[in-house]
Amino acid sequence: MSTPAIETTDLTKTFTSGKTATTAVDRLILTIEPGELVALLGPNGAGKSTTLKMITTLLTPTSGTVRLLGHDVAKRPAEARRHFGFVGQGNSAGSLQHGRDEVVVQALAHGLGRRQAAARADEIIDALGLADFAHRPVERLSGGQRRRFDIAIGLVNRPEVLFLDEPSTGLDPASRAHLQGIIRELHEETGATMVLTTHYLDEADAPSQRVVIIDHGRVIADDTAGALKAGLGDLVTLHFDDVCRAAAAADALRRQHDRVEEAGTSVGVRTDDGPTAGLTILDGLRDAGLQIAGIETSHASLDDVFLHLTGRSLRESDSETGESEDVDPDSPDDNRPDPTEPNPTEEVAA
């Protein structure tokens, strides 16, 4: 059996501010095999970024263990850093610097000679379609171009594992879709293990082989997006002219279906085959003398899966928190670098 790319056991992080303790990650167990493309999906504040920062040596776990390609991250952080790239939420490149120069500097930081660093920077820049923008100041680049330079910086050391923390935050839908395509292509071309955190449903659905849903610091679902949605089934939604008719229809449908949801003048039925079931439901209601005002069928989404698991919508959870970080900013010690190890800033750790 191959060594897992990432393996966490009871990984826990608790932040303390005064007399208040907040557990951001709660005994998280996760195994990711080499070559997998995995999306960690959850609302803001779910513990995704905190998990990534513990795996990448940027935060010290309160308890539990992390192994990256067999290396104990807490005991051998410098060795672990040699094997991964990290693209954080903030821009890695300085706003006044030229994009190519920033990639070259990162290559130099990884120990390449000047000629090697320049050649490596040009290789990555060409692969990511950034040659036309390489000599512009970063502040003059679009958000999508900046994120591609961030990825270029994370790829300098040819990492076996690449971490992307909320890679498309702040991008418009078209730029997000473009970035998703780049991530898919990179995964296919390099074969590297790739882990991205996101609260965007389309981002988790489109590029990933696996979706790990995290809520309150724990894994609550782990499978392919297709399998997670298939397990929930399709939704047939029936609309009625008044609440009384909807209630009567719901009572009739519950005699034949286990998953019936009633909301005002609408009734939803979860079923394995929406279009076929919709016709059967229509026939049954007509035979019972119940006239509908409208009908629609839809496939399950990852938001439906989250709603089913937690009782709330992922979109609603994000609008309630309104934050992109799940690390307590008042934590007194964990963001300080270990003086015995190389400085684990985003660019050096990349």
Image: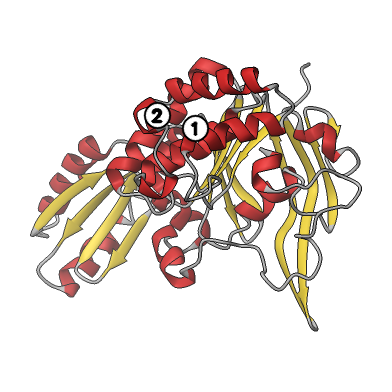
Foreground pick, 172 / 217: 172
- Residue 100, relative to residue 92: is it above or below? above
Q: Which residue is mark 2?
A: 130
Q: Which residue is mark 1?
A: 100
Disc on the earlier residue, 1 or 2: 1
Q: Quadrant of residue 129?
A: top left
Percent position of residue 275, x then y? 21, 37
Mark 1 or 2: the one toward you: 1
Q: Residue at x 39, y 25 (%)?
A: 131
Instruction: Tell me if residue 229 can be seen.
Output: no
243 vs 24, left or right, is: left
Q: Which color scheme is applied?
A: secondary structure
169 vs 194, left or right, is: left
- Residue 133, relative to residue 23: is it above or below? above
Circles 1 and 2: CB atoms closer than 8 Å? no
- Residue type, numbered disc 1: Arg
Percent position of residue 192, x then y? 60, 22
256 vs 293, left or right, is: right
- Residue 221, relative to residue 62: is it above or below? above
Foreground pick, 101 / 218: 101
Percent position of residue 241, x then y? 9, 68
177 vs 338, left or right, is: left
Point out the image quarter for the N terminus.
Answer: top right
Q: Residue at x 43, y 26 (%)?
A: 128
Percent position of residue 142, x then y? 34, 45
- Residue type, numbered disc 2: Leu
Q: For the view shown, which residue lies furthest in the bottom direction?
A: 19
User: For residue 29, which numbered disc appears in the image?
Assistant: none
Q: Residue at x 24, y 69 (%)?
A: 247
